Image (spheres, helix red, strand yellow):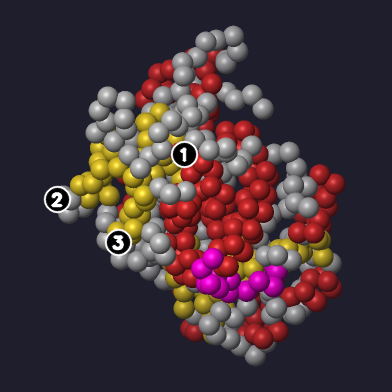
Amino acid sequence: METSPWFKLPECVTKRPRQVAVIGGGIAGNSLAYHLNCAGVEVTLFEKKDTLAQGASGNPSAIFEPKLMRGGTPLGQYLTSSYFYALKFYENLEKETGENIWHHRGGTLNLIVDDKDLKRHQSFQDNAELTTDHYRIASPEQASERAGIAISQSAIWYPKGGCINTSALARSLTSDLHIKLDYDVLKIENRSERELPCWRLHFSDEITSLDFDAVVMANAFDVRKFEQSYCLPVVMNRGQVSTHAGVRISNQLKCVVSGAGYLTPLIENNHVFGATFERLHSFGEAEDLSLTDDRHKHNLEFIEEFLPEFGKAFSLENLGGRTSVRGTTVDRLPLVGPLHNHDNYVQDYALLKNGAKHREWNEPSYHSGLYILAGLGSRGFVTAPLMAHYLSSLMLGETLPISDAVVQAVHPARFVIRDLKRGIETISVDP
């Protein structure tokens, strides 16, 4: 695949960064810090809260499953290659650390909504990104046998799926790292002299500052708080998961059942299910992490409709849960790669609105030594390991582990290029 001029990556690294700052202690930042540390780079991981994985990466469990998709699309390649990489990565991580990072590994059932949806998935089978040993389309009878409870519709069975112990995974990824908790980065200042990149981090205490050769923003929607990245369209979505203590039929459930929502087998004597999805429009809204009955009721609706045996047994007054905010993008692909200079892109590629052919274009302009890994959305525990491997390889001048098509599909500048082609002004998604 020919690389478009505006997606050309920086020239191969001739000098590896010695000291790298990773901002954000969720699954994205933890995975990247792990990969860089394994490559011999001195990494400091910064988290603004008092413990790691306290945002969306801190839910009681994370559903891990692939997605059956038609072959040949960048999104399908991204999701499937990420899934295969994560399977092996987590297996090796367990052996290395001795941690059990799985709550359950008994497969997952993804419910198919109706006959139209069933035919759509059946049409993927001859041209699917996934190999057939990683999925099968199950009839209601087969789905019921897999789940251990009555399922009234067809489903996709993912035999190697499950749900992850998020706290154990965070420990596994960061056990050998230099971690600074309660460090809220307020500003990233370019202190480069000559041609050597140097970035100074300023913190909320307004006193401390630290210098690094390279900085990676892996702090979800908070990337938009920095001067260099305020235009990145990372959308804030608040979600509430619910928990309920075991009921009479709990021990019958053998696997995760998902669809418009999900239900896990028992985890420390509780089922986890959910989740709500609410678009936010300001950083102030993101501070509200309260639990509400309305969101609990939304989560119960999935249980009552698709898993009625549990719906009859669960009661609103006995629910617990957790609310968090995750960063997503509108095209379901993350922002991963070198951070572009937004103003230079707007100037250099303004004529894209008149067509791209037969023109000479400037080389893309990047903030040297500044990178982004954000917008992983709800599949971060599937996709973060490969995206971290890719970004680490890019930063260190190593062979990239993903195709050119996926490199361009996750490129942080793709939205400004999209807007320039449409002839519209590209600005931050929200105030």
Taking 120 as reference, is 88 left or right? left
Q: Which residue is mark 1?
A: 396
Which is closer to the viewer, label 2 or label 1?
1
How far across and down, in percent of the image, does residue 70 sit? 75, 45
Q: Secondary structure at mark 1?
A: helix
Q: CA distance from mark 1 to mark 3?
A: 26 Å
Residue 232 visible? The answer is no
- Front residue (pair 169, 60): 169
How far across and down, in percent of the image, does residue 98 sit? 53, 72
Instruction: Work out whether 323 lies above or below 354.
Output: below
Instruction: Work out whether 232 lies above or below 236.
Output: above
Taking 364 as reference, is 225 left or right? left
Asked whether disc 2 touches disc 3, contact meaning CB atoms under 8 Å apart, the reply is no
Q: Which residue is mark 3?
A: 181
Q: Which residue is mark 2?
A: 207
Residue occupying image coordinates x 43% and y 49%: 40
Q: Extreme left residue here?
A: 207
Q: Amino acid at mark 3?
A: Leu
Residue occupying image coordinates x 30% and y 59%: 180
Asked whether disc 2 touches disc 1, contact meaning CB atoms under 8 Å apart, the reply is no
Q: Quadrant of the C terminus?
A: top left
Label 2 vs 3, first from the N-terminus:
3
Residue occupying image coordinates x 31% and y 25%: 195
Instruction: Work out whether 155 lies above or below 373.
Output: below
Q: Amino acid at mark 2?
A: Ile
Residue occupying image coordinates x 64% and y 85%: 250
Q: Secondary structure at mark 3?
A: strand
Label 1 vs 3, first from the N-terminus:
3
CA neighbours of label 3 inside 10 A, class few (<14), some (14 to 19), many (20+): some
Q: Secondary structure at mark 2?
A: loop
Q: Which residues are magenta?
A: 96-108
